[in-house]
């Protein structure tokens, strides 16, 4: 019980700190949103229009910092994130919700896949240390994960979509297709996601393989594994329930954190493949001094990471009694 | 275990290949059955909001020209040649203080309701009631607007001939029966625009907008295209690939090494980059050293603009001249004698500085009081061509003994610093220009476009102020006589050459690529009937009216 309470208390304090920093940091940046808007209009906006725009945006309204902070807290509590300046006059929540499914679908799925595949390959190659699989897969994926993502993505576009024409080179779906819940549209979306998904997979899987393989190797030297062998248990059973289950523990926290970071999108992926998602939205919001959008996105990110860590802590405590409180 | 893995791998690879091939063959079929359509490739760095408010500067280019139309179209590539559009005619009177438009009758809004002079009157009253919509500052010169039958009469505070461009050509006319019901038109999204234009927005997602033809469009027999696709691109490379592969036919893109990347892919691929405004070094005239005209002149002589153009801009943006007249677009305005006065001449630059009492020490000139000619020049770090250009300039200035240090900033910091005058030198091409050179010169030199250091100036960022020049600019506004206008612009060119308030380096262009495989009617260098970039509004509507399938 005390363990749970302490964890929850820690969660709340971190959340508050994150929310406050989230409020302060954007306000320390130079420039302002109307100016960003003005530059987009190439100096043709007259000062009166600029002033009117500022009022419409709700900036430079001479609200005190403390006042703005409490309004901000109140709005967050009620789920109001305000109007985005980048997507003026659309609501921030609407824009984020529109982009989030794409990110969750692509980055979320590939993160899970990379973890599962990486763990599996790591486990098997450690089990058959020195075997063919161990000699080939881990080195290959460790090398590929060291590739600069940008380069790998451009290369795969050049090879698979420009030279071979197997996959479309960019976008979430074909511009001429109609958005609907139809097989053709879903197929189109899947086709567009294969290349970005593969590149993410290839560059992220190496880490999981390496850690899982090393964990398994040290676990395999433990007495209880020798004991299991001595008992004459089937090899696959030793591999899964004795070695695998113990070796995966340290990786779980890492996995939870990377799940949390899924909502930050993958800026490079979205940039190279022109894939719709929240990653480039982050970038846009920072460039356009779009406080409302920036805050909503950072908040989303911090909250999911914190929740993911909380869940991972809980899961580890359940799986591994040693991490629980001594009391 | 091994076998299972291998099998899974095989299945995976097989499925991938199948899906891939399926995609390729499916696309071929789609292309064969395509009706006449055009796909635009114009990277805007953002997905679409699906808002089409024509008074919202960030989305205006998506509806102004297709949905919403102007009173008179003004061609910026033909020194402002006009084509009557929603107005069937116009006339200046009362010493160029009154402008009267005759509004066409018989037109319909896309929802079937009739269009009339009432809508025009309403639109301008709307701008007055909501300054946030009046992006061209029409009401800073307007006194009143009234209606008389099918005529709409604009009364100006003073003679305001150049404002014709903004009122007739840059103001989208909206429907009274719709916009009068909207409480706050500044924050109005306008998801389903109702206009008089040739196309209707038929579907929109964050990734692509589809426009279909307005079959009851008032210009008979037009448009000839059925569909326009406008995909959103958040980065340049995918947009360029769509052009190179022929999936998009109309590009408005910067493409590095365009010959190898684009032209070589198909003999149907073409490009034309008409120059429109200067990219210049803005010199902060409030800086104690830079306020000395000798320093500014020396810099103007020391820079080899054609080299900057070749190295920094791949030669896409031609070199400028010191008069500020963009050539060849505005050749008829250029004073040849003045243009030849300041050309690349490092020896002359050195002699100017020496004559003004500067002395070289350690390779860098110093003021008589011992301060080195060393300045920081701000630039937008994300514009790789500008960064390269400034590097070339840096070397050239170093050769004569002037040191400049580039600072590559984010665009927001850069804008904030230039607007507020917090710079010594700024490399900038963000003026909007206009259909004649006067507009850019006015943006650069008119003191009303300036502001004290620390306050945002709208376009006179170098803070030039000269009552005589202001008077010239006002005089231009009072005349429709082309000869008089040319004489005034020649005087402004002389100011640019003699006082060097800014140093034009290269000429910013309209980015424009086009594919003639299935479509004709494109703007070409020999027939520049509209500004050809897809982001130019309302010009892109004019282009779409000319396009048809072969």
Image: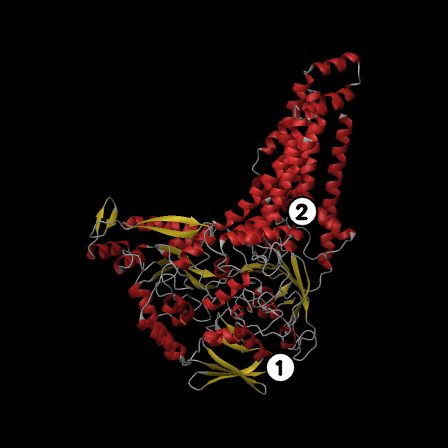
Q: Is residue B374 above or below residue B127?
A: above
Mark 2 sits on what residue? Answer: A165
Answer yes or no: is residue B261 visible: no
Q: Are marks 1 and 2 in contact (CB under 8 Å)?
A: no
| Residue B154 numbered tag | none
Instruction: List x then y, in percent, for residue A56.
Output: 55, 63
Query: Neighbour class for label 2 at 10 Å: few (<14), some, many (≥20)?
Result: some
Q: Is residue A216 above or below residue A299?
A: above
Q: Nearer the viewer, residue B112 or B91?
A: B112
Instruction: List x then y, in percent, for residue A14.
Output: 58, 39
Task: Tell me the element at label 2.
Answer: loop
Q: Nearer the viewer, residue B285 or B23?
A: B285
Mark 1 sits on what residue? Answer: B116
Instruction: List x then y, in percent, for residue A19.
Output: 57, 45
| Protein chain holding label 1 | B
| Quarter placement of the C terminus of chain B | bottom right
Residue B446 occupies quadrant: bottom left
């Amino acid at each position: 019980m005390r363990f749970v309470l302490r964890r929850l208390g820690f969660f709340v304090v971190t959340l508050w700190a994150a929310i406050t920093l989230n409020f302060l940091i954007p306000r320390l940046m130079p420039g302002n949103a109307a100016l960003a808007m003005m530059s987009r209009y190439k100096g043709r906006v007259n000062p009166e229009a600029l002033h009117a725009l500022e009022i419409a945006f709700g900036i430079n309204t001479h609200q005190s910092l403390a006042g703005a902070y409490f309004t901000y807290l109140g709005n967050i509590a009620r789920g109001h994130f305000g109007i985005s300046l980048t997507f003026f006059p659309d609501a921030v929540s609407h824009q984020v919700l529109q982009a989030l499914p794409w990110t969750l679908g692509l980055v979320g799925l590939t993160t899970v896949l990379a973890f599962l595949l990486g763990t599996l390959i790591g486990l098997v190659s450690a089990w058959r240390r020195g075997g063919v699989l161990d000699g080939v897969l881990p080195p290959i994926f460790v090398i590929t994960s060291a590739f600069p993502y940008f380069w790998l993505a451009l290369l795969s576009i050049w090879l698979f979509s420009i030279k071979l024409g197997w996959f479309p080179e960019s976008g979430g779906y074909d511009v001429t297709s109609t958005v609907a819940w139809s097989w053709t549209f879903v197929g189109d979306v899947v086709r567009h996601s294969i290349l970005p998904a593969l590149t993410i997979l290839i560059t992220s899987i190496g880490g999981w393989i390496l850690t899982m393989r090393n964990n398994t190797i040290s676990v395999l030297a433990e007495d209880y594994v020798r004991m299991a062998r001595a008992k004459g248990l089937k090899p696959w059973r030793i591999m899964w329930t004795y070695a695998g289950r113990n070796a995966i523990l340290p990786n779980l926290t890492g996995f939870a954190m990377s799940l949390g970071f899924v909502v930050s999108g993958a800026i490079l992926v979205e940039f190279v493949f022109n894939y719709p998602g929240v990653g480039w939205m982050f970038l846009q919001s920072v460039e356009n001094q779009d406080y409302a959008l920036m805050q909503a996105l950072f908040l989303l990110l911090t909250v999911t990471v914190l929740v993911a860590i909380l869940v991972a802590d809980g899961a580890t405590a359940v799986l591994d009694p040693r991490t629980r409180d001594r009391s | 275990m091994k076998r299972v893995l291998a099998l899974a791998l095989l299945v995976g690879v097989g499925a991938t290949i199948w899906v891939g091939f399926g995609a390729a063959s499916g696309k071929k079929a789609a292309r064969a059955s395509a009706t006449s359509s055009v796909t635009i490739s114009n990277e805007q760095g953002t997905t679409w909001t699906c808002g089409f408010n024509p008074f919202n500067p960030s989305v205006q280019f998506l509806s102004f020209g297709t949905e919403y139309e102007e009173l008179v179209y003004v061609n910026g590539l033909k020194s402002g040649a006009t084509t009557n559009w929603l107005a069937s005619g116009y006339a200046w009177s009362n010493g160029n203080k009154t402008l009267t438009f005759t509004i066409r009758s018989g037109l319909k809004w896309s929802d079937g309701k009739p269009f009339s002079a009432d809508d025009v009157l309403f639109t301008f009253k709307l701008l007055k009631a909501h300054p946030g919509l009046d992006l061209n500052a029409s009401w800073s010169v307007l006194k009143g607007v009234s209606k008389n039958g099918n005529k709409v009469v604009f009364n100006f505070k003073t003679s305001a001939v150049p404002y014709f461009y903004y009122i007739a050509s840059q103001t989208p006319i909206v429907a009274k029966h719709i916009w009068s019901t909207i409480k706050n038109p500044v924050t109005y999204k306008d998801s389903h625009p109702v206009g008089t234009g040739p196309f209707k927005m038929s579907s929109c997602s964050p990734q692509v907008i589809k426009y279909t033809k307005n079959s009851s469009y008032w210009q008979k027999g037009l448009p000839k295209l059925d569909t326009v696709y406008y995909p959103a691109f958040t980065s340049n490379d995918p947009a360029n690939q769509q052009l190179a592969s022929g999936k998009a036919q109309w590009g408005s893109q910067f493409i590095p090494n365009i010959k190898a990347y684009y032209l070589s892919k198909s003999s149907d691929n073409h490009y034309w980059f008409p120059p429109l405004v200067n990219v210049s070094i803005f010199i902060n005239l409030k800086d104690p050293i830079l306020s000395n005209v000798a320093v500014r002149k020396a810099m103007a002589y020391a820079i080899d603009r054609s080299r900057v153009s070749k190295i920094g801009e791949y030669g896409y943006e031609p070199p400028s001249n010191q008069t500020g007249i963009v050539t060849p677009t505005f050749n008829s305005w250029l004073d040849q004698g003045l243009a030849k006065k300041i050309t690349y001449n490092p020896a002359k630059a050195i002699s100017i500085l020496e004559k003004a009492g500067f002395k070289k020490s350690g390779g860098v000139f110093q003021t008589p009081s011992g301060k080195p000619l060393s300045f920081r020049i701000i630039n937008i770090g994300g514009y790789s061509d500008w960064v390269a250009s400034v590097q070339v300039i840096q070397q050239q200035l170093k050769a004569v003994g002037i040191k400049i240090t580039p600072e590559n900033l984010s665009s927001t910091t850069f804008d904030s610093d230039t607007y507020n005058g917090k710079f010594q030198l700024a490399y900038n091409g963000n003026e909007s220009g206009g259909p004649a050179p006067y507009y850019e010169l006015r943006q650069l030199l008119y003191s009303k476009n300036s502001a004290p250091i620390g306050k945002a100036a709208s376009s006179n960022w170098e803070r030039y102020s000269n009552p005589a020049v202001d008077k010239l600019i006002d005089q231009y506004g009072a005349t429709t006589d082309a000869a008089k206008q040319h004489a005034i612009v020649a005087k402004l060119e002389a100011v640019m050459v003699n006082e060097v308030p800014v140093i034009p380096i290269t000429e910013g262009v309209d980015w424009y690529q086009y594919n003639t495989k299935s479509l004709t009617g494109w703007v070409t260098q020999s027939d520049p009937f509209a500004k050809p970039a897809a982001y130019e509004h309302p010009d892109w509507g004019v282009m779409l009216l000319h396009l048809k399938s072969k």
